[in-house]
């Protein structure tokens, strides 16, 4: 009697299953979940309440600009920072070593992690928009094209920053190093990319350097969705540059994937 072995699940199926497991594990860590979602909201409430003057030539307040920028920053926080520290933790506690002994390819692992950060980023956006609308009168767009813009900026931002988080985790010796590295990079780029300070008020050298990284483009794209068109005059080029935004973020998605494939390790070097 001839027996045939059942076909193994495909890469996508394994990735979806891994994503479900990642979500269950993430939301069981109540303290980490509260910190992840509350810190950006706390910064928005604190700093948005301090800087609330109306900008010259418009009816928009600086707190509304800051709120829109912080929506973008929240997406980056829950993709880049969460991914970087999460992969480093999986490597440090032996999760990756155990997964290596299963039929799951590394691409499925990446898919699972991206599902986690995508869901977390959606939740973060909801929290940040609720704060922005209720406390700072941020408008929700009525034009469907604005939501289309939001969708592709969100998607490219999550994928690109998530991949970069995985790549950066490989350079750290452990989860503490990965957490410090991702937070330092993220915090520094927020200052130079027009999140904490209006980008029109930053030195040209600083903004030129920040233009090489995705933070500036994600936050600029999000501002184009939630702020009126006249606010484009406050951007570096005096316009929203959505085509360039898509190109830069798309390039970072490709670069992030290449870096992941080149640098990914199943275990720490000392193991």
Image: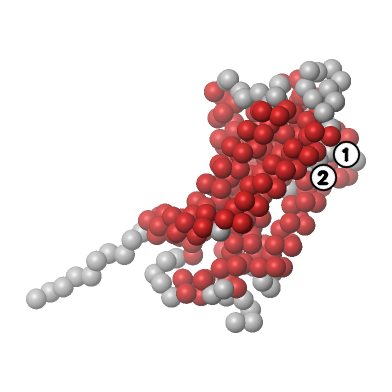
What residue occupies the far left of the structure in this picture? Answer: 1
Rounded to the nearest angstrom, the CA distance separating label 1 from label 2 is: 7 Å
The residue lying at 66 percent from left, 28 percent from top is: 133
Residue 191, image quadrant: top right
Number of numbered labels in the structure image: 2
The residue lying at 70 percent from left, 48 percent from top is: 39
What residue occupies the far bottom of the structure in this picture? Answer: 271
Q: Which part of the image, by quadrant, shows the C terminus?
A: bottom right
Q: Secondary structure at mark 2?
A: helix
Above or below: residue 152 compared with residue 30: above
Which colour assignment does the render follow?
Answer: secondary structure
| 127 on left or right of 220 | left
| 210 on left or right of 218 | right
Above or below: residue 64 compared with residue 41: above
Image location (x, y in percent) of residue 159: 57, 49
Residue 207 seen anywhere in this rendered image of the structure? yes
The residue lying at 39 percent from left, 69 percent from top is: 103
Residue 235, image quadrant: top right
> Where is mark 1, residue-wise?
202
Q: Are marks 1 and 2 in contact (CB under 8 Å)?
A: yes
Task: Give the number of the disc on residue 132.
Answer: none
Image location (x, y in percent) of residue 71: 67, 38
> Where is mark 2, residue-wise?
192
Q: Which part of the image, by quadrant, shows the N terminus?
A: bottom left
The disc, 1 or 2, on the residue closer to the chain's N-terminal end is 2
Sort mark 1 into few (<14), some (14-19) or many (20+) by Cα contacts within 10 Å. some
| 205 on left or right of 154 | right
The residue lying at 52 percent from left, 46 percent from top is: 119
Q: Secondary structure at mark 1?
A: loop
Residue 244 seen anywhere in this rendered image of the structure? no
Image location (x, y in percent) of residue 225: 65, 28
Image location (x, y in percent) of residue 32: 61, 56
């Amino acid at each position: 009697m001839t027996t045939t072995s059942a076909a193994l699940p495909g890469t996508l199926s394994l990735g979806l299953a891994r994503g479900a497991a990642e979500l269950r594990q993430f939301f069981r860590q109540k303290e980490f979940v509260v910190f992840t979602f509350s810190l950006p909201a706390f910064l928005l409430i604190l700093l948005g309440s301090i800087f609330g003057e109306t900008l010259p030539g418009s009816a928009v307040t600086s707190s509304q600009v800051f709120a829109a920028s912080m929506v973008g920053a929240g997406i980056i926080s829950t993709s880049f920072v969460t991914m970087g520290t999460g992969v480093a933790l999986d490597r440090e506690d032996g999760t990756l070593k155990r997964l290596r002994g299963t039929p799951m390819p590394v691409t499925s692992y990446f898919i699972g992690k991206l599902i986690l950060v995508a869901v977390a980023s959606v939740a973060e956006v909801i929290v940040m928009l609720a704060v922005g609308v209720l406390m700072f009168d941020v408008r929700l767009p009525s034009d469907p094209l604005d939501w289309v813009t939001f969708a592709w900026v969100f998607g490219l931002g999550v994928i690109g920053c998530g991949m970069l988080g995985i790549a950066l985790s490989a350079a750290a010796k452990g989860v503490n190093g990965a957490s410090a590295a991702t937070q330092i990079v993220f915090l520094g780029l927020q200052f130079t990319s027009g999140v904490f300070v209006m980008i029109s008020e930053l030195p040209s050298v600083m903004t030129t350097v920040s233009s090489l990284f995705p933070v500036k483009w994600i936050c600029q794209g999000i501002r184009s969705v939630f702020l009126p068109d006249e606010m484009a005059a406050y951007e570096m080029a005096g316009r929203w540059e959505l085509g360039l935004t898509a190109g830069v973020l798309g390039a970072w998605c490709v670069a992030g994937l290449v870096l992941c494939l080149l640098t990914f390790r199943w275990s720490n070097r000392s193991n």
